[in-house]
Amino acid sequence: MKQGNVREAVLDLLLKIEKNQAYSNLLINDTIKKSQLNPKDIPLLTELVYGTLQHQRTLDFYLQHFSKRPLGKLDTWVHILLRFTLYQMVYLDRIPDRAAIHEAVQISKKRGHQGISGMINGILRSIQREGIPKTEKIKDADERLAIETSHPDWMISRWIKQFGKEKTEAIAKANLTHPIHSARVNRTKTTVDEVLQSLEQAGIDAEKSKQVPESITISKGSLAGTSAFSDGLITIQDEGSMLVAHIMSPQKGETILDACAAPGGKSTHIAEMMENTGEVVSLDIHKHKVGLIDQQVKRLGLKNIHTEVMDARHAGKKFEAESFDRILIDAPCSGLGVIQRKPDLKWTKSADDVKRLSQIQLAILDAVWPLLKQGGRLVYSTCTVDMEENHEVISTFINNNDDSKLDKDMYKRLPDAFLNCSGLKPGMLQLFPGEKGTDGFFISSVCKTIKGGS
Ligand SMILES: C[S@@+](CC[C@H](N)C(=O)[O-])C[C@H]1O[C@@H](n2cnc3c(N)ncnc32)[C@H](O)[C@@H]1O
């Protein structure tokens, strides 16, 4: 397949993402599976789709200087074609500008009339001649940061208010870099060294993590088709997520509730730590997602996970009060910590989503709390960087429940590498993108006091 066709696939994908608000990662995987694309073209397709989504606002700032019409008035396909062609010109050194422009003009001739291809050619040639405009002229410093790092204003102002300017700049810049790929070794079946040997034979570059004992980091190659993956020796998982099971610290034979469990990354980690003893009850509100947990349980050869389709807010109807030793709520959230992997979240999420989600998070906490044994531990986590969904949800919950208290010893169960995290507070850890090479992630541990005890 010629490169021109790859770019047409990119245009179709970006149009679908823009119009249907479909998730980029799901759509790309689906397109790759269904299309006849030459495997050699897939890295370019992925780079153009993710890169354009990631740098969308900066690209629009540049384009607006050269377009006579407001960008919002252009046909969507024209706007998107300009965006991803400019992405190649600004960010991809290996593609000559004239080649990128030529491809854009060819596509525009197929899709539109002569006038449109002339306009596209005109805008792109002007940028090629004059260079991109400077952002220094943007007077408002917060708006400049938002445009330079391609984030919406509301997100940048929120982070500045919550974490300060310096931290916000670090988060926003880290969001533009490539995420680190890591995987968890299933120590019920094998060891880290054995997995590394097997991956080396499969041509994958991987090494032991310096941060989490059961983690390996991958610098080259895809794990999906390897025997280590199909034989259930590894699970692809970010190291921030791996910390959850460490903070839970489940003991052999315990009964654990994972209230929002699909696709099962953390349930399976907990079950592995319990070495196939006890029981992990894994709930999810969506039936098809519970099927995904079942697939992972089978692949990993685990015997101690029981799955059920259930809205965690109704768990009290099915399970007895004080019946679980530990509970995990890995809550539905805005996902602002995984922008490196899902850049479209910047353009689809809003401050209203954060508010709505924080109410659901609190409702789930309230519903499952009675199910925790006295003296037990509840771990709450999200993959977001936002105080309203994180610190505030936990503080509100603790204020409303006299038998709850922050677990001040939580840090003792963290691997040493995380003890100097800037977001570590008593009973709470906010991981920021870029700080420890993990996703932006939040974990809090809450203890249930024993009646009549302290
Ligand atoms: C962040 S994801 C969980 C990821 C999972 N813990 C893992 O590590 O693979 C949140 C999950 O909560 C589920 N969910 C949303 N609302 C729920 C509810 N009211 N009750 C139970 N599950 C819910 C979603 O379907 C989603 O699968």
Image (cartoon, helix red, strand yellow):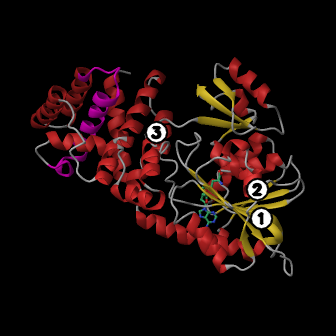
Tag 1–tag 2 contact (CB < 8 Å): yes
| Mark 3 or mark 2, whichever is nearer to me | 2
Residue that badge 3 annotates? 28
Which is more toward the observer, 402 or 305? 402
Quadrant of the frame with the N terminus: top left
Indicate which disc, 1 or 2, sits on the residue closer to the N terminus.
2
Q: Which corner quadrant of the figure contains ligand 1?
A: bottom right
SS at circle 3: helix
Residue that badge 2 annotates? 248
Which percent across, then down, holds residue 92?
35, 26
In the rendered view, does 367 fall on the left or right side of 273?
left
Q: Which mark is residue 377?
A: 1
- Residue sitting at 72 percent across and 80 percent down? 402
Q: Is residue 73 magenta?
A: yes
SS at circle 1: strand
Which percent across, then down, holds residue 203?
64, 19
Which percent across, then down, holds residue 23?
46, 48
In the displayed structure, 98 sits above or below 320; it is above
- Residue sitting at 62 percent across and 48 percent down? 421
In the displayed structure, 94 sits above or below 296; it is above
Q: Give the alpha-carbon distance from disc 1 to disc 2, as whole Å.
A: 7 Å
Amino acid type at circle 2 is Met
Q: Give the alpha-carbon distance from disc 3 to disc 2, as whole Å.
A: 34 Å
Q: Residues within 10 Å of mark 1 (few under 14, many from 20)?
A: many
User: Looking at the image, can residue 21 be seen?
Assistant: no
In the displayed structure, 279 sits above or below 199; it is below
Which percent across, then down, holds residue 253?
90, 56
Amino acid type at circle 3 is Ile
